[in-house]
Structures are given as structure tokens and as C-alpha cells.
């Protein structure tokens, strides 16, 4: 069995994240549906963030240097932790402001969009041109 080149692994991860982002935006974006309970919305969003984080981790670790993977993990851990804190506060008290809700939705969009994944690939490619990527 032949080994996949890093550029194919990167493209596979990009396609998978784009599919997950599209699936969420088309079928699961129930943010503005008033009849859905908040806990279902939070669980739905948390699941998508974890899936995208897992896809990125599995595909980026094949060719990223250790310090870039550390940045990938730190960004996700910090933002997921902040989203969890906001979500738990909303579950327990249910009175977060609209501004905090908008910030949480923006952070969530950033985490599931392919922007961070592509930027990590660009940095890797620009810093380490001798390694084959794209």
C-alpha cells in the first residue's frame, strides 16, 4: 500500500472540514428557530466543533511541526473552553446578553470554518518550503 502525500492529506482534511461546515450551515443551523431548546442547540454546536477539531488534528499532524500543532490545540482548547463557560452559564442562568451570544456565535463560526485550517497550511507551506505540501 502506497503512502499518501502530505498535500493529499491536507486536501482531504480541507474537503472534510468544508463538508462539515456546509452540513452545519444548511441542515443544522437552528440558531434562530425559537421552538428548539437551547440545550439541543448547544449540544449540536459542541458536536460540530469537536468533529472539525478531530478532522484537523488527524490531518494536520501528518505534516505539521510540533509548535504549529501546539498552536492548533491551544486555539481550540481556549475557544472551546470559553464557549463551554458561556454555554454552561446560559444553561444555569439563561440570561446572557445578546452581545455575548453574538461573540459566542462568531467564535463558533471561526472554529468550524476552514479558515483556521487553511491558515495553518499556508503558514506551514511558507515557513517550510522544502517540505512538500501543495
Image (spheres, rainbow, N blue to C red):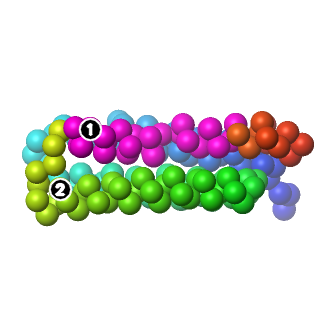
5 sits left or right of 26 in the view: right
The residue at 83%/43% (across/down) is: 128
Closest to the observer: 63 or 35?
63
Pointer 2 or 1: first along the chain: 2
**Quadrant location of the N terminus?**
bottom right
Q: Secondary structure at mark 1?
A: helix
Q: Is residue 21 visible?
A: no
Badge 1: residue crowd in 10 Å (few <14, some 14–19, many ≥20)? few
25 sits left or right of 129 in the view: left
Residue 3, image x, y percentages: 83, 57
Mark pair 2, 1: CA separation: 13 Å
Quick check: 6 above or below 99?
below
Verify whether residue 102 appears in magenta: yes
Q: Main secondary structure of the magenta part?
A: helix
The residue at 10%/51% (across/down) is: 95
Residue 31, image x, y percentages: 23, 41
124 sits left or right of 26 in the view: right
Quick check: 22 above or below 44?
above
**Quadrant location of the C terminus?**
top right
Q: Secondary structure at mark 2?
A: helix
Magenta range: 99-122
Number of the label disc, if any, that sits on residue 11: none
Which residue bears the numbered disc 2? 90
Which residue bears the numbered disc 1? 102
Amino acid at each position: 500500500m502506497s503512502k499518501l502525500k502530505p498535500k493529499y492529506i491536507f486536501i482531504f482534511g480541507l474537503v472534510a472540514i468544508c463538508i462539515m461546515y456546509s452540513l452545519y450551515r444548511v441542515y443544522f443551523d437552528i440558531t434562530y428557530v425559537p421552538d428548539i431548546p437551547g440545550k439541543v442547540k448547544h449540544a449540536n454546536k459542541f458536536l460540530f466543533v469537536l468533529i472539525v477539531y478531530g478532522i484537523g488534528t488527524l490531518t494536520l499532524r501528518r505534516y505539521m511541526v510540533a509548535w504549529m500543532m501546539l498552536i492548533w490545540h491551544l486555539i481550540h482548547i481556549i475557544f472551546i473552553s470559553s464557549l463551554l463557560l458561556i454555554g454552561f452559564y446560559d444553561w444555569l442562568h439563561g440570561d446572557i446578553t445578546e452581545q455575548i451570544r453574538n461573540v459566542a456565535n462568531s467564535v463558533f463560526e471561526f472554529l468550524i470554518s476552514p479558515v483556521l485550517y487553511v491558515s495553518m497550511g499556508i503558514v506551514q507551506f511558507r515557513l517550510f518550503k522544502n517540505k512538500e505540501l501543495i
